[in-house]
Amino acid sequence: MSETKLLSEHYDKDEFIGLAGYKKHGGYEVLAKALKMQPQQIIDEVKASGLRGRGGAGFSTGTKWSFLPKNNEPRYLLCNADEGEPGTFKDRLMMERAPHQLIEGMIISSFAIGSKKSYIYVRGEYHYPIAVLEKAIREAYDAGLLGKNILGSGFDHDMDVYSGAGAYICGEETGMISSLEGLKGQPKLKPPFPAVQGYLRKPTIVNNVETLAAVVPIIKDGAAAYRKFGTEKSAGTKFFSLSGNVNKPGNYEVPLAYPMKDMIYKLGGGIRNGKKLKAVIPGGSSAPVLTAEEAEKVLLDYESIAAAGSMLGSGAIIVLDDSQCMVDCLANLTHFYHHESCGQCTPCREGTGWVDKIVHSILSGRGRLQDIDLLLKVADNMKGRTICALSDAAALPVISFVTKFRDEFEYYVREGRSKVKGTVLYAEMHH
Amino acid sequence: MFQLSPEGLGQVKKELARYETKESAIIPSLYVAQKENKGWINEDVIRHLSQVMEIPESRINEVFKFYTMFNQKPVGRHHVQICSTLSCHINGAPELTAHICKELKVGMDQVTEDGRFTVSRAECLGSCGTAPMMQVNDKYYENLTPESAMNILRGLK
Ligand SMILES: Cc1cc2nc3c(=O)[nH]c(=O)nc-3n(C[C@H](O)[C@H](O)[C@H](O)COP(=O)(O)O)c2cc1C
Ligand code: SF4
């Protein structure tokens, strides 16, 4: 099975990046159509399409939009382009290859929810995507697609780009709002949810890049056409960022419920260097790891991956071959979460530090057998008791790695070296 | 005493008027100042920004300290940030890092004697499909080998 390029059909063409080329392939025709619809009609269509947020949580987009207060209070649309979940690189592709697709999706969405101002919050490291977006926004203004009275519809909308400055936590929607407000990017307690009280305490919708771009084909051909792809509960196509030990890493757009096996062996060209599949992290580093056996059976939709005990998340698939040491890989992830915890909540701040320390002491050959159960206990205490989901996200890899590959952790403690690769090179570099 | 250039000052003024609140201009202004202060930020820079922006130093300082892209100590002209998170880690980032540090004769987060380079570890840079990779100042270099990376770095004056 090959890709289904509902969004990415023209991503290989350089002309698609500029306004003229985008228009040549039908660009902004959907906006013209949308501006003649009733805003509520658009929301209903998006709801009926079954579109779920592509940023990680998979929440129904149309439902989220309908949480906005039904009055004339000013409101904001924020596009989440912070893309920091390890393994994820699809939003970057979308911004670099099709900035106008995102902008069109954002204008349509803004019209639907009645927002006169939107921001695209892009992670600071993405200098090039930011430059591409800024140029595209200028083109859109010059062509009357942004600003006052868009395409003669009477609808006004302004859009701007905001650059983050290096903090994974700013991908969490309330952390992003804090950051945009000029504060430390620390998450805020929910409720109130952003749809009720968000940016500058005004109702705010936060959606991922891919979610907002998907609004374009949904409004173009309707919910029913979108539902031809995927399943009842996981409708449409989705980008998967495939990386790790595969021959052909990259972004692939496929219908949801596409087999993981085909993703790895067909689109991904199989495992590198003639090695064998050992494990897969199916939805970004926060998603519990799957064994090769589990991974080869699973379908890439929200329900199937949940039934296998993990999460579809952002769609980042990290493939590990049988030469990888699971203690080493986990140590890499615990370092990440410890580094990225914003420190507001004790279970997260202390927990991420503690598990990172324990895993690294095992990695350096100083581990004790009881440390393995201690890891599980500390991770368990990090779950469900914090302001945002980072703490849970940090606990899940620990629990899944230790539970599913316990023998490797025990071997490491007993022998003081990796069961798979003997010495783990540069272990000291983790700190 | 640090002072923004006239162009830098113009950019900060523009950012101050760009967003709904002027506090949103703190991050963009820190970028402008960092660029004009050889890639890092100290108390002097914060003090000057505070005066120019009419925002208390403590407010600017907390933002400065929170984000990793603002450097709290001097860096070389070329800041080499090697992505070290999982997909890069299992595709040669540790070997890449060791090789670059050895060739440049420099430890992590230190400045080379000639002032050209600082090598740092970065967390996931969203380039996992083209691992291993490094970011040098604003630019991404992908699908690296230790040798190709050193060739790129040797070409940077
Ligand atoms: C720690 C953490 C990091 C996150 N990072 C991102 C991110 O980089 N990009 C993103 O779109 N969503 C991210 N999210 C999810 C957002 O909070 C939010 O749910 C999402 O942007 C909503 O958009 P969607 O409904 O279109 O997916 C993150 C969540 C958490 C808890
Ligand atoms: S859970 Fe962690 S990252 Fe989230 S708000 Fe609390 S301390 Fe910060």
Image (cartoon, coloured by chain):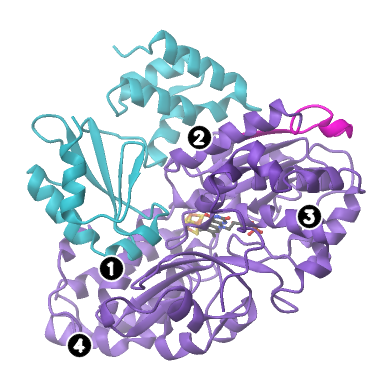
* Disc 2: which residue: A131
Q: Main secondary structure of the magenta part?
A: loop
In the image, residue A155 lies in the stretch drawn in magenta: yes
Residue at the extreme top of the image, as rendered = B6
| Quadrant of the image occupied by residue B110 | top left
Asked whether the residues under the numbered discs 3 and 2 touch, taking CB atoms below 8 Å apart as contact, a structural biologist would say no
Question: In the image shown, does A18 or B52 lie closer to the viewer?
Answer: A18
| Label 1 SS | loop
Q: Are marks 3 and 4 on the same chain?
A: yes
Q: Please, what is the three-letter code of the amino acid marked with disc 1?
A: Ile
In the image, residue B147 lies in the stretch drawn in magenta: no
| Label 4 SS | helix
* Disc 4: which residue: A411
Please report whichever mark, 2 or 4, sits nearer to the chain's N-terminal start: 2
Q: Nearer the viewer, mark 3 or mark 4?
A: 3
Which tint was used for chain B?
A: cyan
* Chain that bears disc 1: B
| Label 2 SS | helix
Question: In the image shown, does A155 or B3 lie closer to the viewer?
Answer: A155
Over which residues does the magenta segment extend? Answer: A145-160
* Disc 3: which residue: A65
* Disc 1: which residue: B90
